[in-house]
Each structure stands twice: as C-alpha cells, then as structure tokens.
C-alpha cells in the first residue's frame, strides 16, 4: 500500500517529468528517475509533511525549465516548458 505522502511526492515530481522508483532504503528513500530516459536524477525521502513535495518541486520549476536541474537528456526542460 502506498502512503498518501508517497503518492503526493509521485504526483509532484511527475509534473516536471520525473518518476518515483521503488524504495531504495528501508522504504524511506525513493530514487527519482527521468521519465524520458530512466536515468537516476536523485533521491527523495518520504518524511516530508503534506504539501511540502509540491512546494519544493514548484519552487525549483525555473531551474528545471532552464535545464539546470534534472536529467542531461533534457526531458524535464521539455516537460516544464511545454
């Protein structure tokens, strides 16, 4: 069963072209994968408070749009600027 916070994290990152992978360590950390090519682009923990994931990702939206965050393949830049 996926917790509400994990689903919130999944939805927040999906908006910038990143998908949440399976738990990486004890179910608390998840790998972030480029939804375009599958390359690992980071990790996120599930100990965020409700609303934090969306706020964090939205606060970095300009960095994704400029290609400064995300995968070198450019998928996040394409998704955010579309």
Image (cartoon, grey):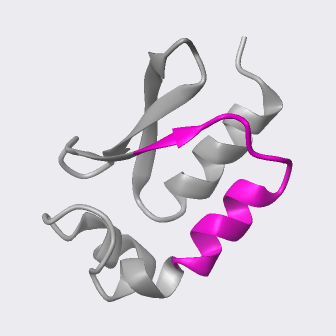
Evaluate whether residue 82 shows in this view.
Answer: no
Where's residue 4, x and y in %?
A: 81, 32
- Vertically, is 43 above or below 17? above
Where's residue 24, x and y in %?
A: 42, 21
Where's residue 43, x and y in %?
A: 43, 42
Farthest right residue in view: 50
Q: How many numbered markers are drawn?
A: 0
Evaluate whether residue 76 shows in this view.
Answer: yes
Say whether residue 46 is left or right of residue 36. Answer: right
Q: Nearer the viewer, residue 74 or 82?
A: 74
Which residues fall within the magenta stretch? 43-60
Q: Tell me which corner region of the image, top left, top right, bottom left or bottom right, holds residue 10.
A: top right
Where's residue 48, x and y in %?
A: 74, 45
Instruction: Please state, as top left, top right, bottom left or bottom right, where the N terminus lies in the image.
Output: top right
**The magenta stretch spans residue 41:** no
Q: Residue, x 41% and y 83% (percent of image)?
A: 63
Q: Residue, x 53% and y 54% (percent of image)?
A: 13
**The magenta stretch spans residue 53:** yes
Q: Tell me which corner region of the image, top left, top right, bottom left or bottom right, holds residue 54.
A: bottom right
Q: Tell me which corner region of the image, top left, top right, bottom left or bottom right, holds residue 64.
A: bottom left
- Vertically, is 36 above or below 46? below
């Amino acid at each position: 069963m996926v917790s509400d916070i994990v689903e919130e994290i999944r939805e927040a990152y999906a908006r910038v072209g990143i998908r949440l992978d399976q738990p990486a360590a004890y179910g608390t950390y998840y790998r972030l994968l480029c939804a375009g090519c599958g390359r690992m682009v980071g990790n996120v923990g599930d100990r965020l408070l409700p609303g934090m994931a969306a706020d964090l990702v939205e606060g970095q939206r300009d960095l994704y749009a400029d290609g400064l965050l995300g995968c070198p393949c450019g998928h996040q830049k394409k998704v955010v600027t579309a």
